[in-house]
Image: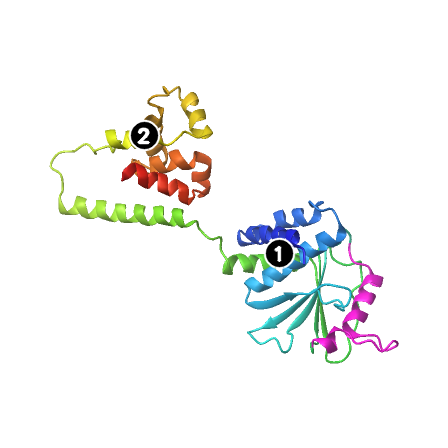
Amino acid sequence: MSTAAIQQAKQLLRLASQNQPDKIYKILSAPMAKSTTKYKGDVFEYFIAGLYEGLGYIAVVGGGKNDKGADIVLYKGRSQVRAEAVIQAKNYKTPVSKDTLRTTYIKFFGDHFSGEDGCTKIYQCKHFIIITLNGFIQNADKFSPPKGCTIDHYDWSHVSSLIEEYAKQNPPEQHPYLRWIGIVALLGLVIFGVTRCAKPAAHPVEDKVETLSADQVRRLHKIPNNQAVKRDCDRYKFKQETCPEQLVHLYRDQYGNGDLSIGVQVYFCGVGNFKKGQCDKLTQKAVEYVFE
């Protein structure tokens, strides 16, 4: 089992949840971090297994010299007594040849000349699937399986359809912090609407802008500045002694729509991390300290 290959496959599955088959194909086709045929093959296998897992199957990745061509074994439901299908995944630069397929078929159905058993007997499965990155040489897949057995030959177009279905059933997970902002914003709109309806103002009233109190400024200054803060201080030409509170008020208007707590959040998290929804627990503790 290659941990690096599994991690690479997980990255591809994140792209699959965003329905980006072209980007995934480009990554699988290009040389990878560990430029070996086995590594690229492992990534492709784990990725295909992950797609099927996301569609409700149990997908067991095989491997080793005695796997008899069973790169992935699919099961439906919790029972793993009898396989639903056996998959061989081939991440080749070129279309798969006839000779390669002939060897693959022998592994699956067995060789009656040598008496060796194949996947069909080992896994009690008669459905064989071959998935390739770049298809097959013309007419290479013209092969009649033994009676009662079926073979499906799939190229990248089939993988694209799997990715599309995977994206529907496994949409990208929204960061909890972003969900929290959405909920707060929605509640704010509801409260604002109720207030406007219940108490119509006879004259326009200026909204009160939240600002840091003297105690909050003091606590803000107690926490050392990071490099991102120092860069923004220079960028906006704020004086060092007043820069922290000026940045908080700036971030409040730019990213928090007047919400002071968001301004403090961006200050400690950093603009880039905030936009990506990657603020951590230390950031939250710092925010809580300022507002305590």
Q: CA distance from mark 1 to mark 2?
A: 47 Å
Query: To which quarter of the image does residue 48 belong?
Result: bottom right
Tag 2 residue: 249
The amino acid type found where label 1 is placed reads Ser
Q: Is residue 230 above or below residue 98?
A: above
Left or right side of 203 for 5: right
Tag 1 residue: 160
Q: Residue at x 37, y 36 (%)?
A: 255
Q: Residue at x 32, y 41 (%)?
A: 288
Where is the C terminus found, in terms of image quarters? top left
At numbered mark 2, what does the secondary structure look like: helix, strand or loop? helix
The residue at the far left in this view is 202
The residue at the far bottom in this view is 147
Image coordinates of residue 150 in percent, x first then y, are 71, 74
At numbered mark 1, what does the secondary structure look like: helix, strand or loop? helix
Image coordinates of residue 117 in percent, x first then y, are 79, 76
Residue 114: say if magenta.
yes
Q: Residue at x 66, y 53 (%)?
A: 5
Image coordinates of residue 175 in percent, x first then y, are 43, 49
Magenta stretch, residue numbers: 95-123
The amino acid type found where label 2 is placed reads His
Image coordinates of residue 236 in percent, x first then y, are 40, 22
Query: To which quarter of the image does residue 253 belong?
Result: top left
* Residue 75 tag number: none
